[in-house]
Image (cartoon, grey):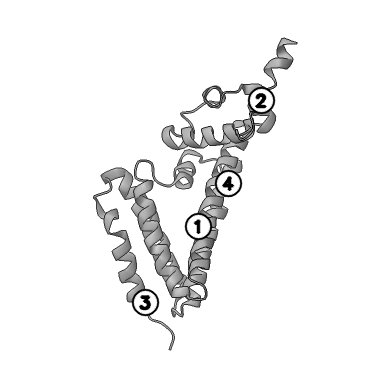
């Protein structure tokens, strides 16, 4: 009876997140602030107000939980790209410039720890880790979305422009962690605008 009670959380009051959502939210916060390797499932379960048995009922392993956290981050970023696209309708160049303003502002909110997915890629060198696929697919989709905007905006070499913007963003995220918000990353938006301005467009 005691084991059975430990395996189940009490019912959640109306409006309160269930155990899976609490575990996911807590894990995302702890992994981001302290690193994936620095946080164990015991700490996650305790902070989520549950227990390891419940955690493993929703996520078969810590690796699966890590992948779920990164998938949630990726989905939020992609929803923001979609919002940018909808906001500017058929104006691909407006979408591209709006994305520049968006990532410039995002850098400030990420200032302490940078990109969650890039950080995870460094912490998880194992190529067969379930989170690696989440990271690689997200970063590929980000680059592909940039290339779509660049092509639809009429730039002559959309793949080159997309790669330049992508690499500049990734570098800025590393720079902001090493030398802070006031370093070179503070010029990201202006640098991106200059790169875009100097790329030839189709007649």
User: Reading the chain from its start, which is encountered first: label 3 or label 1?
Assistant: 1
Which element is circle 4 on?
helix
The residue identified by callout 1 is 80
Nearer to us: label 3 or label 1? 1
Q: Which of pointers 2 and 4 lies earlier in the amino acid sequence? A: 2
Where disc 1 sits, the SS reads: helix
Seen at 48% across and 31% down, the residue is: 37
Q: Number of marks in the image? A: 4
Front disc: 1 or 4: 1
Q: Is residue 104 above or below residue 119?
A: below
**In the rendered image, the vertical position of residue 21 relative to residue 49, given as above or below:** below
Determine whether label 2 and label 1 are within 8 Å by CB.
no
Label of residue 71 in the image: 4
Looking at the image, residue 111 sits to the left or right of residue 126; the answer is: left
As drawn, the residue found furthest toward the top would be 2
N-terminal label among 1 and 4: 4
The Cα atoms of the two marked residues, 2 and 1, are separated by 32 Å
* Residue contact at pointers 2 and 4, CB within 8 angstroms: no
Residue that numbered label 2 is attached to: 54
User: Which x, y percent locates residue 76?
Assistant: 53, 51
Residues packed near mark 3 inside 10 Å, few (<14), some (14 to 19) or many (20 plus): some
């Amino acid at each position: 009876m005691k084991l059975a009670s430990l395996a189940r959380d009490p019912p959640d009051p109306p409006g309160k997140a269930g155990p899976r959502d609490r575990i996911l939210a807590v894990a995302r916060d702890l992994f981001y602030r302290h690193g994936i390797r620095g946080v164990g499932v015991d700490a996650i379960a305790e902070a989520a107000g549950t227990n390891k048995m419940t955690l493993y009922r929703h996520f078969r392993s810590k690796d699966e939980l890590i992948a779920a956290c990164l998938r949630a981050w990726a989905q939020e970023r992609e929803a923001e790209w979609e919002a940018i696209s909808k906001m500017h309708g058929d104006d691909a160049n407006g979408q591209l410039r709006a994305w520049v303003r968006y990532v410039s502002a995002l850098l400030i909110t990420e200032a302490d720890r940078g990109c969650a997915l890039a950080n995870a890629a460094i912490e998880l060198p194992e190529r067969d880790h379930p989170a690696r696929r989440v990271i690689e697919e997200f970063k590929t989709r980000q680059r592909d979305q940039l290339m779509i905007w660049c092509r639809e905006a009429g730039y002559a070499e959309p793949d080159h422009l997309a790669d330049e913007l992508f690499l500049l963003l990734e570098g800025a995220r590393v720079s902001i962690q090493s030398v802070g918000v006031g370093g070179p990353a503070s010029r990201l938006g202006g640098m991106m605008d200059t790169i875009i301005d100097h790329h030839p467009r189709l007649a």
